[in-house]
Amino acid sequence: MKLNKEIIISADDFGISKNASQKILELVRNRKINRVEVMVSKNITPEQIQELLNSGVKIDIHFHLKIHLLDKWQDRKEEFKEGNFKRILAFLWDYFFSRDRVGETEAEWYFQLSDFKKMFGKYPDGISSHEHIHFFPAYFKIIMEIASQNSIDFVRLGRNNYKNYNPVSLILNFLRFFDMRFYKKFESKIKTTNFFVSFDWIDNYERFLKNIPENKNIELVFHPERPEEYKFLLNLK
């Protein structure tokens, strides 16, 4: 089936665990991925960094909150899953009440950006964040300023809402309304896709493709540490 739609495959959470990094590198070798989202971690090896650089894939920074301690996840065999409701509550708690308030998060993300540049020898090709926390407007302003100051020309946002009844998708659609107002100040030099969709929001892949308007591009996000998503990507033509 020939589609007049550009599907950009992004793999989230490189560096969150040994298993996640290994699965993503295997998919990179098989040319199944366009963008890799890197969570800065001392557990990423120089050999892994060089392989990513040599592969030609876009390498984005995947910002995370200070409370997301990557070391404790390194030896997990499978990704730890929480229900949507619990994740939403965690989002709100982090944003309004936790010790990772906006000012501290801004400082933390500049540290992560500096570490990324030391590791890869360059600034990232784009910006995203763990659990999409950058969609909260105060955090979105931070990433747009970081992108603008460092000539990073891609951010994960999506210009249009993806119509889906997944609770996370609905919340991001609501937040996107406010983020787009700020994004418009930068859109001449910082790109995003027409749509951003996480694979776990999709119940039928063929129907999903048919419902996307022609001549649009979509960032489709996977978490290859999940066995079912890894297998789907391996078999994707």
Image (tube, rainbow, N blue to C red):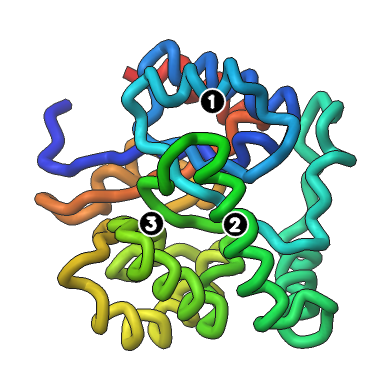
- Tell me what residue is drawn at x 72 percent, y 63 percent: 65
Query: Alpha-carbon neighbours of circle 3 within 10 Å: few (<14), some, or many (≥20)?
Result: many
Whole-percent x, y for residue 24 in the image: 55, 25
Q: Which amino acid does the dot numbered 2 rest on?
A: Phe
Q: Which amino acid does the dot numbered 1 rest on?
A: Ile
Whole-percent x, y for residue 96 in the image: 75, 86
- Which disc number belongs to residue 63? 2
Element on which disc 3 rests:
strand
Give the mark, 3 or 2, whose residue is nearer the N terminus: 2
Q: CA distance from mark 3 to mark 2?
A: 17 Å
**179 sits left or right of 84 in the view:** left
Give the mark, 2 or 1, whose residue is nearer the N terminus: 1
Q: Are marks 3 and 1 in contact (CB under 8 Å)?
A: no
**25 sits left or right of 235 in the view:** right
- Tell me what residue is drawn at x 82 percent, y 85 percent: 97
Q: Are marks 3 and 2 in contact (CB under 8 Å)?
A: no
